[in-house]
Image (cartoon, helix red, strand yellow):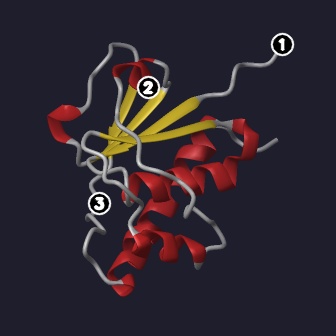
Amino acid sequence: MTDPKPTVLFVCVHNAGRSQMAAGYLQHLAGDRVDVRSAGSAPKDAINPVAVEAMREEGIDIAANRPKVLTTDAVRESDVVITMGCGDACPIFPGKRYEDWELDDPAGQALEAVRPIRDDIKRRVEALLAELAPSA
């Protein structure tokens, strides 16, 4: 019997930039080895178009994603919760693994400023994936 695949929830305030890029990378790199979710404490109406463009440069399409509101159930059902500047808005449950990634907010930034944020997210996601679901 195999272990169930881990569920990772990425959370930022608007669920329009950082958390969407992180979820895009993890989905792309992990395939079906990890369940990936993202949400925001105060979600925007649409994904940041500069974040979409930055990810497109990496061959990852997040354009069809939609920001989702953070729910208590989403946190409860996740094994790992990665927050990115959502402050006290993120519910905490004992026994969960929490990490807070300090990343600049790509909102209102030019593509040149978003690329380093994207690249930092990629490095962090790769390290997380190596820990959670090492390739066979």
Instruction: Name the one closer to the observer, 123 or 13.
Output: 13
Horizontal and vertical percent position of residue 121: 44, 60
Q: Earlier in the sequence, mark 2 or mark 3?
A: 2
Q: Which mark is residue 103?
A: 3
- Residue at 83% across / 13% down in the picture? 1
Q: Earlier in the sequence, mark 1 or mark 2?
A: 1
**How far is mark 2 from mark 3, CA to CA?**
22 Å
Judge the density around disc 3: few (<14), some (14-19), many (≥20) Cα neighbours within 10 Å.
some
Q: Quadrant of residue 89?
A: top left
Q: Under tag 3, what secondary structure?
A: loop
Residue under numbered circle 1: 1
Judge the density around disc 2: few (<14), some (14-19), many (≥20) Cα neighbours within 10 Å.
some
Q: Is residue 114 left or right of residue 78?
A: left
In the picture as drawn, the residue positioned furthest to the left comes out as 88
- Residue at 36% across / 31% down in the picture? 98
Q: Which amino acid type is marked by label 2?
A: Ala
Q: Which amino acid type is marked by label 3?
A: Leu
Q: Residue 45, relative to residue 69: is it above or below?
A: below
- Residue at 43% across / 69% down in the picture? 51
Q: Quadrant of residue 46?
A: bottom left
Q: Under tag 2, what secondary structure?
A: helix
Q: Under tag 1, what secondary structure?
A: loop
Q: Is residue 34 left or right of residue 87?
A: right
**How far is mark 1 from mark 2, CA to CA?**
26 Å
Q: Earlier in the sequence, mark 3 or mark 1?
A: 1
Instruction: Name the one closer to the observer, 30 or 24.
Output: 24
Residue under numbered circle 2: 74
Judge the density around disc 1: few (<14), some (14-19), many (≥20) Cα neighbours within 10 Å.
few
Instruction: Name the one closer to the observer, 83 or 127.
Output: 83
